[in-house]
Amino acid sequence: MARDPGRENVPAVQRLRIQHAKRGRLRFTSHRDFQRAFERALRRAEVPMAYSSGFSPHPKVSYANAAPTGVASEAEYVEIGVLQECDPTKLREKLDAVLPPGLDILDVVVAHTSDFVARLEASHWQIELPGVTPAALEAAVAAFLAADEVMVERMTKSGLRVFDARQAVLRAVVVDESALTVVGETPESVENPDESGLDSICAILALVVRHGVPTVRPDDVLAALSKIADLVPAAPSRMTRLAQGPLLEDGWSVGDPLAADRSQV
Amino acid sequence: MTVQSVFPALERLLPFVQKPVQYVGGELNAVIKPWDDVTVRWCLMYPDAYEVGIPNQGVQILYEVLNERADVLCERTYAVWPDLEKLMRENNVPQFTVDAHRPVGAFDVFGLSFATELGYTNMLNAIDLAGFPIHASDRGDNDPIVIAGGHAAFNPEPISRFIDAAVVGDGEQAALAVSDIIADFKRAGSPGGRDELLLRLAKSGVVYVPKFYDVEYLEDGRIRRVVTNHPDVPWRVSKHTVMDLDAWPYPKAPLVPIAESVHERMSVEIFRGCTRGCRFCQAGMITRPVRERSMTTIAQMVDTGLKATGYEEIGLLSLSSADHSEIGEIAKGLADRYEGTETALSLPSTRVDAFNVDLANELSRNGRRSGLTFAPEGGSERIRRVINKMVTEEDLVRTVTAAYAAGWRQVKLYFMCGLPTEQDEDVLQIARLAHEVIKAGREATGRKDIKCTISIGGFVPKPHTPFQWAAQLDHETTDSRLYKLRDAVRNDKLYGKSIGIRYHDGKPGIVEGLLSRGDRRVGAVIEQVWRDGARFDGWSEYFSYDRWMAAAEKAFADEVVDVAWYTIRERELSEVFPWDHVDSGLDKEWLWADWQDALDEVEVDDCRWTPCFDCGVCDHMGTEIQVGPTGAVLLPLPTVRSEVVLSGS
């Protein structure tokens, strides 16, 4: 409440783009939960935030394309506006230090470009399916890719939506366990190594999905696999966004969305 | 033996429940210690949903005090919602802590903080989900010692068959003393097992252990006497009182949840205890004497707490925050310090006077003035003399008008219904008061958009208060009075549209009354209603009055007592109360004299500003009033350059 009116319309002198992860048990963090935790972390890290004007000023933070609640991610992006120029390396270290383990800051760059959100063209997802053999998954994926469209439904804020989950999928391959990306240790997994362990039988699906309206999420693809090939995992699947960014020339590789900002330094 | 985390099993259930983040822990400032590095392991529970339990100061303080000890670890658990409970039962996942997801049954101590009696069924459910017996007498050497604390523990008798012990009063030193006793016992190889440990705890006087006390009844159902059945156990157990709050500046690093909670702010307790002497107020009676935290310590706790949490709001808590001897300096000092930092200060004070309005103005200097709350508690001056809430109608109208004039648009007024000696007329006066308030407010401001909200709670007589002898008002009369008041407000043609009214029906109050002044026989009702499905009784969508009454009928089938006997019956001077062997320090004769004064409409002063009137607490407990002023001054905080800012900038 105590607020210096003279500061109200001071514009940000610098914008910074931040890549962060949502790991382990904190993948159950909702987008709103993350916003609160992140804005408190900015205060703990004493980041000189720019604020919006008005009766209840908010720090200038923009969030893009948050992964759904319950889905882990190595590639979430946030942009902040600050009143004093910050050192991105120090900001990364400080912010990461004040966030709980599981919400981890991976990269910070100074924004030099304007079309950031447009660069988030597609996501690379990894899905672990407990109790499913690689062979069964191969068959289901083949059936899915052979189809022109697979309609699925999902409850959204605006009601039940029915949409195609097939066309947005640019690539779907069953990967070997050795190729599995295991990320992030939480305090619990340190003490109980079993925690991040996999079921004895577990197939792994790598997906590249183009962003669109409505966004096709990895659980939509699972719903499609279930519909087209009766593929149902024995336990809830563990889903992780490994990357999001621009599509590269091959049409399915996902590039680094911060590369353009980095190259301008 | 290391205990395994239940998280892998729990994790599979979480995609199917509402708000899974509440079960995963990971709060900022949470502590996870290796299981084998310590001797004594505590699991603390606030027996309500996570969103209600996580901000609880009692649990946060004990969590930190206990975890500071090298030989102790402390984790937390909360009530799980029915959606998860069902899945846990189907998949054999036990009640778990949110810190390291260890099974609650593996801990040495299971400590519960009861702010209200309506958490009792959640305790039974948690014990049952943890997989150990709900009856203390059925527990073995490897089961946790169940200890109840919090204000409801001042009458632990209704839950005496479920708990092994109760801590009465402030928990900080008591929890450490219990830890010492258990550590010594375990280091000695746990000689004599559970029975010996409970005896050691009882002999120390640190806790009340119900199994060493026998209750004898008269034929008419009243208690004849309560006697100890062991020669080494004290006949009464005394409350604990922490003196010198500056020496106990907890929590230093408050827990900051990822999930949303009911209080999204940091709290600093600015003093403990209250001697205003409101006769209905159990908190004011059982937390005496007043012990202030100094302005300097408060300011330091605010500073370290903000740095540790990143919260945007600080609440200065106590039973009546405007009564701190240096509250004016504190408010101004903190408002100066945090000006321009987007940090809001709040003072949940409901005192009805102009000074309180000045304070609220100071704290909201540069911000929005939305709502301000006052608590006259009684509708008529007569009833306010009965309850010892010394506010005249003139005071109230003047105070509220000052608030409107200072730019506050909405004023909330708290009242109670069902107070001793109350007639319809006393409650109907509330409508007239609200009318006068709006009238004066419109005259003072010339505005028509000012609003007044009346909020009314049903009065429940509580142990250790002058009203412990009083008859509770039956719920039918409570409801009819509230309807009459509602109609009176609606019929106010001039100002009715500016007056809002909020109330709850009288039924939950009867169950609270049964549990508040109940004895050991009420335990059978709690057990029955829990078996019949009662959970989350503090939530109107889960509470069922009919289920409680059916359970009481079954449990009391062979007793001479019933719900009415516990609730709407007035007691006589000679009655032995179920809580007489729990010593709050208050002299029972003084309480009776204050009850008689209430009936005679005689007021009593506050002992902070007048000579002692012998309530008994300080003499009996060896405590003293600790108030300022200290005369200290809060200097501006030094501005430290942020580490993340570029050096040239």
Image (spheres, coloured by chain):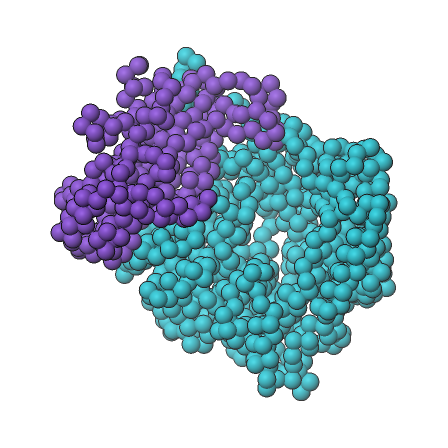
Chain colours: A purple, B cyan
Residue B190 seen from this side: no
Quarter of image, res B441:
top right
Residue B494 seen from this side: yes
Q: Residue at x 46, y 57 (%)?
A: B78
Q: Residue at x 43, y 18 (%)?
A: A14
Comparing B369 with A125, the one in front is: A125
Quarter of image, res A124:
top left
Q: Residue at x 43, y 35 (%)?
A: A38
Residue that extends furthest to the top in the rendered view of this protein: B648
Q: Is residue A105 above or below residue B15?
A: above
Comparing B539 with B382, the one in front is: B539
Q: Locate the N terminus of chain B by quadrant.
A: bottom left
In this picture, residue B421 sits left or right of residue B584: right
In this picture, residue A121 sits left or right of residue B180: left
Q: Is residue B71 above or below residue A72?
A: below
Image spot of residue A249 (x, y percent): 20, 25
In this picture, residue A162 sits left or right of residue A125: right
Q: Locate the C terminus of chain B by quadrant.
A: top left
Image spot of residue B129 (x, y percent): 40, 66
Image spot of residue B491 (x, y percent): 82, 53
Q: Residue at x 38, y 68 (%)?
A: B131
Comparing B282 with B24, the one in front is: B24
Image spot of residue B201 (x, y percent): 48, 67
Number of marks in the rendered image: 0
In this picture, residue A152 sits left or right of residue B636: left
